[in-house]
């Protein structure tokens, strides 16, 4: 068993190392740690550090041995320590959902209730709810399935800058629905209303003929800043009717 030699930095900040998973997959990474004492200090912050039988516990134990860890153990110790100090990169969608956020913000200014949009596409119902002042991230928008907390599925959050941070449960269908909503809110809201017979904003049944054809009600159109049908055509008809008198 060859003894592990500390990485040679030669004025570099990071030195490449690699470990192999059980199935043989190579995982290359770079370490900023100059020696195993530094590595052990970081490993001790791991939640399993105190458990000698855990993987991390066994690595700490091996580093503490007089003989030192094997090459394999030392490389893994570096890898785990590097993972511990690396902030988890959040996956972000390359799509601006700012129009969706702004639409909810506009509605929030007109009503006491927190604005909410419920959209159904295929067999998935997605609820967008603005987080209130008492929440941890007020003004952001939670995207999830309807239902009680703990029983629903959380798809992600729209940040205050309009970027969407999807959770692991988010699906391509949900992502596409959000993209479509941002691109043309009136169209997506209208499609939902025409298909389900209820308004995606207030969830009331669309009672009159015109609301049913538009897909949402006139009050919600004003609140969310959307057109309500073809107003220019309505104006033209109105004008024609007056001229005919
Ligand atoms: Zn409505």
Image (cartoon, rainbow, N blue to C red):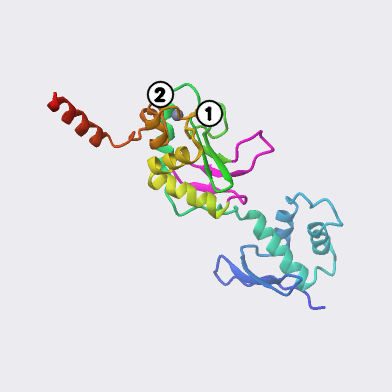
- At 73% across and 55% down in the image, what residue appears? 43
- The residue to which callout 1 is attached is 132
Q: Secondary structure at mark 2?
A: loop
Percent position (x, y) of residue 13?
56, 65
Tag of residue 60: none
Q: Secondary structure at mark 1?
A: loop
Percent position (x, y) of residue 108?
44, 27
For residue 141, say whether it is visible: yes
Image side of residue 52 versus residue 23, left or right? right
The magenta region covers 145-170
Percent position (x, y) of residue 24?
73, 75
- The residue to which callout 2 is attached is 110
- Among numbered discs 1 and 2, the one appearing first in the sequence: 2
Q: Which residue appears farthest toward the front when viewing the image? A: 245
- Is the shortest distance between ligand 1 and the CB of mark 1 under 8 Å? no
Image side of residue 157 versus residue 66, left or right? left
The image quadrant where one finds the C terminus is: top left
Label 1, label 2: how far apart the Cα atoms are: 15 Å
């Amino acid at each position: 068993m060859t003894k592990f030699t500390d990485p040679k930095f030669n004025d570099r900040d990071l030195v490449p190392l690699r470990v192999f998973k059980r199935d043989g997959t190579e995982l290359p990474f770079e370490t900023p740690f100059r020696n195993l004492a530094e590595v052990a200090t970081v490993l001790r912050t791991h939640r399993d550090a105190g458990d000698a039988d855990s993987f991390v516990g066994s690595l700490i134990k091996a580093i503490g041995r007089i003989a030192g860890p094997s090459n394999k153990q030392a490389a893994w110790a570096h890898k785990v320590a590097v993972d511990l100090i690396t902030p988890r990169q959040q996956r972000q969608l390359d799509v601006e959902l700012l129009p969706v956020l702004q639409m909810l913000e506009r509605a929030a200014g007109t009503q006491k209730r927190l604005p909410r949009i419920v959209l159904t596409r295929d067999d998935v119902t997605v609820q967008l709810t603005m987080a209130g002042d008492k929440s941890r991230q007020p003004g952001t928008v939670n995207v999830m399935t309807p239902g009680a907390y703990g029983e629903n599925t959380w798809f992600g959050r729209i940040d205050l800058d309009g970027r969407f941070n999807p959770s692991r449960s988010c699906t391509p269908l949900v992502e596409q629905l959000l993209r479509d909503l941002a691109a043309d809110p009136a169209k997506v809201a209208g499609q939902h209303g025409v298909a389900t017979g209820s308004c995606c904003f207030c969830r009331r049944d669309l009672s009159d003929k015109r609301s049913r054809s538009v897909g949402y009600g006139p009050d919600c159109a004003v609140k969310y800043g959307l057109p309500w049908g073809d107003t220019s055509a309505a104006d033209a008809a109105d004008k024609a009717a007056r001229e005919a008198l």
